[in-house]
Amino acid sequence: MESKSGEGKVVCVTGASGFIASWLVKLLLQRGYIVNATVRNLNLDNENLIILLLLTTFLKIKPPYKGQVDLGEAAAEAGKRTEPAPESEAPTVTDPSPVCEIAATPEPPAFAEAAEAAPSSPTLASRSDEFEDMFSGTPPATGEAAGFGHLPIPRATRAASQTSECGARDGLSMMIVNEAFVHAQQEVDDLKGQLDAQSRETEKFLHLLRAKEDELNQAITLSNLRPELDAAKAENRQLKEDTSKVAHLLGLDGPNERLHLFKAELLEEQSFDAAIDGCEGVFHTASPVSLTAKSKEELVDPAVKGTLNVLHSCAKSPSVRRVVVTASTSSVIFNKNMSTPGAVADETWYSDPEFCEERKQWYQLSKTLAEEAAWKFAKENGIDLVTLHPGLVIGPLLQPTLNFSCEAVVNFITQGKEAWSGGIYRFVDVRDVANAHILAFEVPSANGRYCLVAVNGYSSLVLKIVQKLYPSITFPENFEDGLPLTPHFQVSSERAKCLGVKFTSLELSVKDTVESLMEKNFLHI
């Protein structure tokens, strides 16, 4: 039976749409946690949401039930308006769904029931005192005749028919009945035609709305309404509208009740306050990953400032009892000792910022400085901090995008291209990394740093497993098959095992990674 250790507890996961974080959110939800998840973009610039806001709040436009609205004039008129439309003028909209749909429908005319027969020259106006409920849609209560199409026969016609059946014996009565019937049928046809025309006008109206979006936005800007629109959009930050980067999160078990999305930016102060407020635990996974950055500022600023922004928000919330930061082996092993044959790195090792800077290893520098800043802030502010240091994280993808580490696997297989010089990797499964985060939060004795490495090896280890799974595969010419099984430099995970982390075999991790990459069309074998 699956553990529900998080029942009723609220935690926050930053960068929730990422590779590791997506799995972390999945496992947290499975354990019963309530998860506040931050993402960079909730895609709130939803076309229909904007249109509806414009219609109902700013432009005072009503759907064209009785004719076409000129949007050029409406946009120009928007510059003259500073007050929102009265509630009575706003159309009723039930749902800003991807297909912009006006919920209100035209109100059909009412008719008073005729006593005996209809006048000889009926019109829509004159009928208003003679018929009622022509379009009521209510089935006859006592077996009366069916209507034309989806509309009931006018009661005047039924009344006239009943009069005839009760004893009208002359031709005049029958003529009156027939005339009433003909006129009523004509009115039904005319009104149905009007409704069809109005429906077509509505479609044209919506089409023009989309075509005029830029013009409308310009009108809003010129009329100083942009701040009001931005404020309205900000109120919807927890809406689950992003259909690309967060859709996979919304498909997990339990998101409707226990997953709450927040927009947050690493470099924006107080951006994480709302998401972290009231949480017991915070998992900070958000950080840029790139080995091709051209300057240290490109990676160092988001990594360091983003970590401090998250920790500042944690310090403000008295409910936070532990913070788990996703660091990296990059902040452990990059120093002069890594070239020592037979060396085994562990949690007591620290990367040297000068060593990284001399070699322009900006990603390694960013992770090193971010971890240093985190420990310094945590000590000064009494925050219970744990840092996790995974190697090259592989495994099945939940997110729709190709992350750096899984792209490295694709490059191994298709190009024989190494992710970095030396070709020594510290492989670990993403599911084990996500589980280690939860253990680091739940285990009371957890503290300090934990290296997460299942296997130390060369890329050739991965390729041999792939070759066994797919014997017909052809590898690039630069594939090296004669490398030693154990590299001269390794990272130990003994401390993580003491925490309770159990590592997936490399064979299963590679198999699941390759199958996932193929399923998502990132790899073709």
Image (cartoon, rainbow, N blue to C red):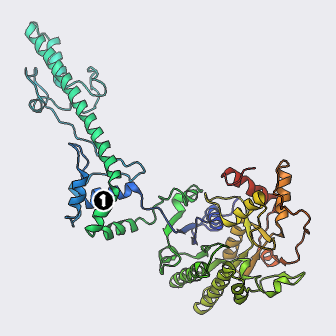
In the image, residue 213 sits, relative to residue 315, either above or below, namely above
In this view, the residue in front, 416 or 332, is 416
**Does residue 345 appear in this view?**
yes
- Nearest the eye: 327 or 262: 327
Query: What percent of the width, then of the height, locates residue 22?
Result: 62, 64
Q: Identify the residue shown where x is 29% and y is 64%.
A: 220
Q: x, y (%) of residue 174?
A: 13, 11
Image-based side of 322 in relation to 435, left or right: left
Bin the neighbour count of mark 1 within 10 Å (Cα to Cα): few under 14, some 14-19, many 20 and up.
Answer: many
In the figure, residue 344 lies in which quadrant?
bottom right
Give the residue drawn at x 17%, y 21%.
Answer: 157
Residue 215 position within the rendered picture, expressed as x and y whole percent measured from the top left:
31, 58
Please name the residue that numbered disc 1 is placed on: 216
Image point 71% across, 53% down: which residue? 523
Task: From the top left corner, tell me how far across and down residue 309 is, in percent.
Answer: 53, 82
- Callout 1 secondary element: helix
Q: For this rendering, which residue is in front, 3 or 510?
A: 510
Q: Residue at x 90, y 71 (%)?
A: 486
Residue that extends furthest to the front in the rendered view of this protein: 477
User: What is the quadrant of residue 191 in the picture?
Assistant: top left
Give the vertical position of 246 relative to 150 (above or below).
below
The N terminus - image quarter = bottom right
Is residue 293 or residue 486 the one in the foreground?
293
Q: Is residue 188 above or below residue 211?
A: above
Number of labelled discs? 1
Q: Is residue 445 visible?
A: no
> Mark 1: which amino acid?
Leu
Eyeballing the image, is 317 above or below 506?
below
Task: Answer with the quarter of the image where residue 355 lies.
Answer: bottom right
